[in-house]
Image (spheres, helix red, strand yellow):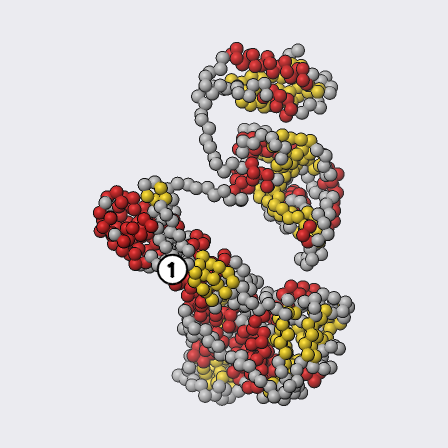
């Protein structure tokens, strides 16, 4: 971006470095390309003589006058000549890029300085010769005074959502809003009425792709070199001058950010423009001397017979202007961003035009851009409008309206920005604001304002003390009081100073036109008073060039950007009690924290997968319309695919103990249309290897199916207080698989062991069982209890007993535990199977040791009470499960 070009639109005094910092704070990451104001010892010099170097054919020995003295310089440029005014870098100078100039001996002759080229000054890529200045410039003049006003430039990284900033006018608009300057319009779009009644016929394809196309003819143009001012502006922005017609189109692109195109009218079969879809396999010769094979989803411009341009991307070679061009057809259009992006990507062809169209150009500036081109042509190329202007438009140009409330602005930002400032910022961004509603302040505060004598009461002064402390912070933020005064006010408030509270009340009365942030509202006698209800709202009309503004949050971001993030003072929370929002993310956030605390690691995998991989999981692939690569071409249907890849990657790189969890979006196809694709939030865990590695204190703890099962029981039974059951089910790629259900039989998760054959088919390296657990996020949230309650501490001891039963291998232990627990739920607090023993002697049976925990919350349990319950348990288990005690 050229600073002199920006000054066409807005006046500013900042240097390139200062401007780069300012734009970075506005959200446009910037760095200086050329800032001549920081260059030292670089002046205008005159070549008094330029003779052939005695020891080299391609070098010249020059005498350079810098206005004070002369210097002997060896120069290799072929165009250096006696009498030229040049840019001379003295010994000690530092050129852009931190290139230091010192004395040097070149082929036996000492050189004291350097005569600079445009490339060395970072003005352009021209390096074949030195830069020659105007002969009228005085020797010794600082180069910053000569080149700075024309060639100071900064490089700006524009994010994809900021298409409005891809021009000098767009950046200038941001600067004008930030610096509180007026935005100028150096080139107006005055409508021109032609003498001719001719008209260009424009036909737009009904399937879309182009929703506005402006076309007109300019006759009797003269192609030639551009005037110096136009060449200089293009050069300052890193563009080469080609000829006046091409330069005009490029100038408009960089000036207002809207791409246009100029056709040689005499090369068209007829003055007709038809925008339509290309034929599959059609060949197109472009301006870049390349031939492209088009597809049926490429949008092209034709003259009803031949393809003359690839819409929004590049013009055609056959219809390009040349030195013999006399009549031209000007195109100014709006093309669908998606169509342009897909077409550009398919051909691997990125142009300045496609870069703007695919991000979203301004459809409303199309006609203005056309007339600006006409005006420049009349001025520079001597042409005249030779037809009625055709404006074919199917685009809805009605502006969007978004409501912005001051209350939400304060809530999102955490502090109060005065209403006048908000409206001023939005107006500076060309967002028209209509105010609705007004700010009101708390009724009890209003009572104090109307009668400050009420502060005579010590009770009222005490009740209002917290509010007044918050008010001091607010007044400091808006600049009403200094930091030093704020400290003094806080001290006086602490001691209940009547004078200080009255003074603050008067300040509040003076500044109450803007509502206070919600956290500043006082609490009276332990009860929250009437809130500061800010009913002020702005109905904002969004300009057509701001396609990125779609909701209230976007407007809040705009206000903050221009207000300045660096102007936001740090503040403290004055809430006297902790509050927990019942937000949707809190249950899963707590689950993540728990899993991380026991050794799991969170991973993030791509939501795009290979088609073959999805098929292996037995699910129908969902193809994406515009895949990022041939391999990643379908949406994932499960998190298992990514988790297994992560396991494989870690295993191959030496990490065999893997504990992972992931939260992400998965997709399921339920029909043939886009509406039939179900998108849902998923949560999965994977365990492989050891849960805990061995050390001198304990053996390794294996991360297996039972570990995951225990984690599930701990999460639901102990943390969430939700009773769960494990129900065995069959699964396509898991040998052992259980659904996890609650007492209402709602599915809240599942866990299983992935089949060995499936892992081999997927080429996943492993050494132990690969276990997975899924959590149904929607039902998990329903299990989550937002109101945490502490249970009473039982003062009486726990009594535990062991029971060892021999039973059939097919019996599920969970069923046995439930049966035992139901014998006496009031005293039997927990039943835990702690050991399972199997051997050849037991054949098809197993020995299971159960540990039982008894406790009475009201008294100490006696032995006979526990013994009677144990006897009942033994009797029921022996009969129901055909079991026997281990001792028998």
Taking 884 as reference, is 312 above or below it?
below
Work out which quarter of the rendered image holds the C terminus and state it: top right
Say which residue label 1 marks.
Answer: 418
User: What residue appears at the point 64 percent right and 50 percent down from the top-left corner?
Assistant: 607
Residue 770 coordinates in the image, percent (x, y): 67, 37
- Say how many tags the image has: 1
What residue appears at the point 68 percent right and 72 percent down from the top-left corner? 204
At a point 67% along the width and 33% down the height, the residue shown is 738
The answer to whether residue 407 shows anywhere in this view is yes
* Residue 280: image location, x then y, percent: 77, 67
Q: Position of residue 820 (x, y in %)?
A: 60, 20
- Horizontally, residue 482 falls left or right of residue 178, namely left
- Left or right of 566? Residue 511 is left
Left or right of 17: which side holds 674?
A: right
Q: Quadrant of residue 749?
A: top right
Element marked by disc 1 = loop
Q: Residue at x 54, y 68 (%)?
A: 545
**In the rendered view, would you say 634 is above or below 822?**
below
Q: Is residue 491 visible?
A: no
Find residue 527 and report its horizontal and vertical position in percent. Answer: 35, 42
Residue sitting nearer the eye, 757 or 470? 470
Residue 44 higher or lower than 458, as above or below: below
Specify few, some or many for label 1: CA neighbours under 10 Å numbering under 14, 14-19, or 20 or more: some
Which of the two residues, 795 or 372, is positioned nearer the viewer here? 372
Q: Residue furthest right?
A: 281
């Amino acid at each position: 971006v050229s600073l002199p070009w920006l000054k066409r639109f807005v006046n500013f005094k900042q240097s390139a470095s200062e401007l780069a910092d300012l734009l970075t704070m506005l959200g446009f990451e910037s760095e200086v390309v050329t800032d001549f104001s920081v260059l030292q010892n670089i002046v205008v010099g005159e070549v008094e003589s330029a003779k052939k170097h005695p020891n080299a054919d391609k070098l010249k020995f020059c005498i350079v006058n810098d206005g004070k003295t002369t210097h002997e310089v060896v120069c290799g440029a072929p165009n250096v000549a006696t009498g030229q005014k040049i840019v001379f870098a003295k010994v000690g100078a530092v050129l852009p890029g931190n290139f230091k100039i010192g004395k040097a001996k070149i082929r036996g002759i000492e050189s004291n300085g350097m005569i600079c080229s445009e490339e060395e000054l970072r003005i352009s890529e021209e390096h074949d010769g030195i830069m020659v200045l105007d002969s009228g410039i005085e020797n010794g003049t600082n180069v910053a005074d000569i080149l700075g006003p024309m060639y100071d430039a900064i490089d700006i990284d524009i994010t994809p959502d900021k298409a409005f900033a891809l021009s000098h006018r767009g950046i200038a608009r941001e600067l004008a809003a930030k610096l509180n300057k007026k935005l100028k319009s150096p080139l107006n779009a005055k409508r021109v009425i032609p003498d001719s009644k001719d008209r260009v016929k424009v036909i737009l394809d009904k399937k879309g792709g182009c929703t506005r196309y402006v076309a007109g003819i300019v006759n009797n143009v003269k192609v030639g070199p551009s005037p110096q001012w136009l060449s200089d502006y293009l050069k300052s922005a890193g563009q080469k001058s080609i000829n006046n017609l091409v330069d005009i189109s490029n100038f408009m692109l960089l000036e207002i950010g809207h791409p246009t195109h100029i056709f040689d009218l005499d090369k068209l079969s007829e003055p007709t423009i038809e925008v339509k879809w290309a034929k599959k396999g059609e060949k197109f010769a472009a301006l870049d001397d390349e031939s492209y094979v088009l597809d049926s989803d490429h949008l092209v411009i034709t003259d009803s017979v031949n393809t003359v341009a690839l819409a929004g991307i590049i013009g055609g070679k056959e219809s390009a202007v040349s030195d013999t061009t006399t009549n031209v057809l000007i195109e100014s259009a709006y093309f669908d961003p998606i169509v342009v992006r897909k077409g550009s990507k398919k051909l691997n062809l990125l142009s300045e035009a496609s870069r703007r169209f695919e991000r979203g150009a301004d459809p409303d500036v199309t006609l203005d851009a056309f007339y600006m081109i006409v005006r420049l042509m009349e001025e520079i190329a001597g042409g005249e409008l030779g037809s009625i202007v055709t404006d074919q438009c199917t685009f809805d140009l009605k502006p969007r309206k978004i409501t912005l409330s001051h209350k939400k602005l304060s809530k999102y930002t955490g502090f109060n920005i005065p209403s006048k400032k908000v409206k001023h910022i939005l107006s500076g961004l060309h967002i028209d604001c209509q105010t609705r509603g007004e700010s009101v302040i708390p009724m009890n505060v209003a009572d104090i304002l109307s009668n400050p004598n009420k502060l005579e009461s010590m009770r009222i002064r005490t009740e209002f003390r917290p509010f007044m402390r918050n008010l001091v912070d607010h007044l400091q933020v808006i600049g009403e009081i200094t930091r030093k005064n704020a400290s003094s006010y806080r001290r006086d408030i602490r001691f209940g100073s009547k004078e200080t509270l009255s003074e603050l009340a008067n300040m509040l009365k003076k500044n109450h036109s803007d509502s206070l942030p919600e956290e500043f509202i006082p609490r009276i006698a332990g009860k929250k008073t009437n809130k500061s209800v800010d009913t002020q709202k702005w109905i904002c009309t969004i300009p057509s060039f701001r396609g990125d503004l779609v909701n209230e949050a976007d407007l809040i971001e705009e206000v903050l950007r221009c207000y300045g993030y660096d102007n936001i003072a740090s503040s403290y929370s004055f809430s006297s009690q902790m509050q927990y929002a019942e937000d949707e993310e809190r249950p899963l956030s707590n689950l993540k924290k728990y899993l991380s605390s026991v050794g799991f690691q969170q991973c993030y995998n791509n939501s795009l997968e290979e088609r073959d991989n999805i098929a292996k999981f037995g699910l129908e692939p969902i193809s994406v319309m515009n895949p990022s690569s041939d391999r990643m071409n379908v949406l994932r249907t499960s998190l298992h695919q990514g988790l297994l890849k992560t396991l494989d990657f870690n295993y191959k790189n030496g990490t065999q103990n893997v504990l992972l969890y992931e939260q992400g979006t998965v997709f399921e196809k339920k029909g043939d249309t886009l509406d039939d694709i179900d998108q849902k939030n998923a949560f999965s865990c994977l365990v492989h290897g050891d849960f805990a590695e061995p050390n001198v204190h304990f053996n390794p703890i294996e991360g297996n199916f039972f570990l995951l099962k225990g984690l599930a029981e701990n999460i639901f039974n102990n943390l969430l207080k939700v009773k769960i059951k494990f129900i065995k089910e069959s699964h396509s790629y898991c040998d052992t698989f259980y659904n996890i259900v609650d007492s209402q039989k709602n599915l809240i998760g599942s866990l299983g062991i992935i089949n060995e054959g499936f892992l081999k088919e997927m080429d996943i390296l492993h050494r132990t069982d690969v276990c997975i657990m899924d959590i149904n996020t929607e039902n998990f949230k329903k299990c989550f209890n937002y109101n945490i309650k502490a249970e009473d501490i039982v003062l009486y001891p726990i009594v535990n007993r062991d029971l060892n039963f021999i039973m059939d291998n097919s019996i599920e232990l969970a069923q046995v535990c439930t049966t035992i627990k139901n014998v006496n739920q009031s005293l039997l607090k927990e039943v835990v199977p702690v050991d399972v023993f199997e051997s050849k002697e037991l054949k098809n049976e197993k020995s299971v040791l159960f540990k039982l925990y008894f406790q009475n919350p009201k008294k100490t349990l006696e032995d006979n009470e526990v013994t009677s319950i144990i006897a009942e348990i033994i009797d029921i288990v022996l009969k129901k499960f055909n079991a026997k005690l281990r001792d028998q």
